[in-house]
C-alpha cells in the first residue's frame, strides 16, 4: 500500500469556533488504481488532498507514505520526490513552452538539459500532444491540451503517487472523459496510484474505487450499483 490514512483528524480554529473537518479517517490506496474522492463543497475534500500532498499534517492520526508517517519526512522533500499534483487551473508556467514546462521538474532534480528535453518530448507524446504543439506556449492551447501538458509534467516527477485536484473542473464533458480515461490508462500502465478529488459525478463511473467525503469520514461507495 503506497498511501494510508490512519485515524486522521483535522480541525480549523478561528477566533470564534473550532470546526472539526476530519473525524478519524481510515483508508488506503494502492498503486495501479485510480480512486475518486467526491463530496459537497466544504465537506473536507481539499483538506484530505492537502494532507496527502504533504502541504499540512493531521491534527492527530497518521498519513503514511509507504509505511512512513509524513510527520517523519521532511515535507519539502516529500512534495518534491514522492508525490505529484495536477490542478484544475493547470498551473503551467506561462513564459515556458510545453517542452520547457515538462522539463522543469526534471531539471530541478539535476537532470541534464538534453536528457530532460528528450524525456519531456516522450512524455508529451505519451499524453497525446503532437510534435507540432510541443513548442507552443500554454496560452495558445485549449483547456484539454493544457491539462495533458500538466499531466506530462506530473509524470516527469517520476513519482508513484499522483493527486488530481478537480482536474476536469475547467473542461467540457467530452474533454473531461478523455482526461479521466488518460489518467486511468496511466495508472495501469505505469503502476501509479492516482487519486482524483472532484465534484464531477459524471466521471465517477470511470474510477476503480470511489470514496465519498461525508460527516468527516471517507465512506467507500459501491460503484457496481451505479
Image (spheres, helix red, strand yellow):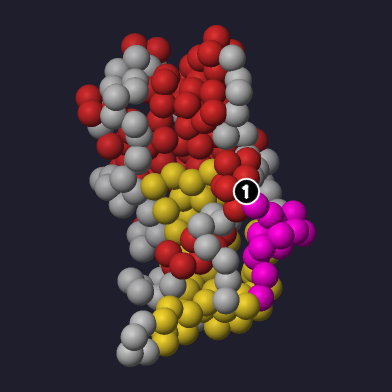
Q: Is residue 108 left or right of residue 26?
A: left
* Farthest residue, direction bottom: 16
Residue 202 among those drawn in magenta: no
The spot of residue 165 in percent (x, y) is 42, 53
Provide the residue designation for mark 1.
78
The relative height of residue 68 versus residue 155 in the rendered view (above or below) is: below
Residue in view at x 54 percent, y 28 percent = 108
Label 1 crowd bin: few (<14), some (14–19), many (20+), radius 10 Å? some
Front-lying residue, 61 or 216: 61
The spot of residue 80 in percent (x, y) is 58, 41
Whether residue 97 is visible to the viewer of this picture, yes or no, is yes
Location of residue 204 (image quadrant): bottom left
Report the number of discs.
1
Location of residue 222 (image quadrant): bottom right
* Farthest residue, direction left: 140
Which residues fall within the magenta stretch?
A: 61-74
Whether residue 35 is visible to the viewer of this picture, yes or no, is no
Q: Is residue 139 left or right of residue 1?
A: left
Please state, as top left, top right, bottom left or bottom right, where the N terminus lies in the image.
Answer: bottom right
Amino acid at each position: 500500500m503506497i498511501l494510508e490514512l490512519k485515524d486522521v483528524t483535522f480541525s480549523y480554529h478561528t477566533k470564534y469556533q473550532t470546526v472539526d473537518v476530519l473525524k478519524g479517517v481510515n483508508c488506503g490506496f494502492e498503486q495501479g488504481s485510480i480512486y475518486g474522492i467526491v463530496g459537497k463543497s466544504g465537506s473536507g475534500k481539499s483538506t484530505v488532498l492537502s494532507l496527502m500532498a504533504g502541504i499540512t499534517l493531521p491534527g492527530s492520526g497518521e498519513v503514511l507514505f509507504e509505511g512512513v508517517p509524513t510527520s517523519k519526512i521532511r515535507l519539502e522533500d516529500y512534495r518534491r520526490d514522492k508525490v505529484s499534483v495536477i490542478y484544475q487551473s493547470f498551473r503551467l508556467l506561462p513564459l515556458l513552452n510545453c517542452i520547457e514546462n515538462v522539463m522543469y521538474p526534471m531539471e530541478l532534480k539535476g537532470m541534464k538539459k538534453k536528457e530532460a528535453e528528450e524525456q519531456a518530448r516522450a512524455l508529451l507524446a505519451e499524453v497525446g500532444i503532437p510534435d507540432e504543439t510541443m513548442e507552443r506556449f500554454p496560452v495558445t492551447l485549449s483547456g484539454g491540451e493544457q491539462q495533458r501538458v500538466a499531466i506530462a509534467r506530473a509524470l516527469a516527477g517520476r513519482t508513484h503517487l499522483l493527486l488530481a485536484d478537480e482536474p476536469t473542473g475547467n473542461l467540457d464533458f467530452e474533454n473531461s472523459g478523455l482526461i479521466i480515461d488518460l489518467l486511468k490508462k496511466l495508472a495501469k500502465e505505469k503502476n501509479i496510484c492516482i487519486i482524483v478529488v472532484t465534484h464531477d459525478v459524471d466521471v465517477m463511473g470511470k474510477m476503480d474505487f470511489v470514496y465519498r467525503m461525508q460527516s468527516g469520514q471517507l465512506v467507500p461507495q459501491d460503484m457496481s450499483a451505479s
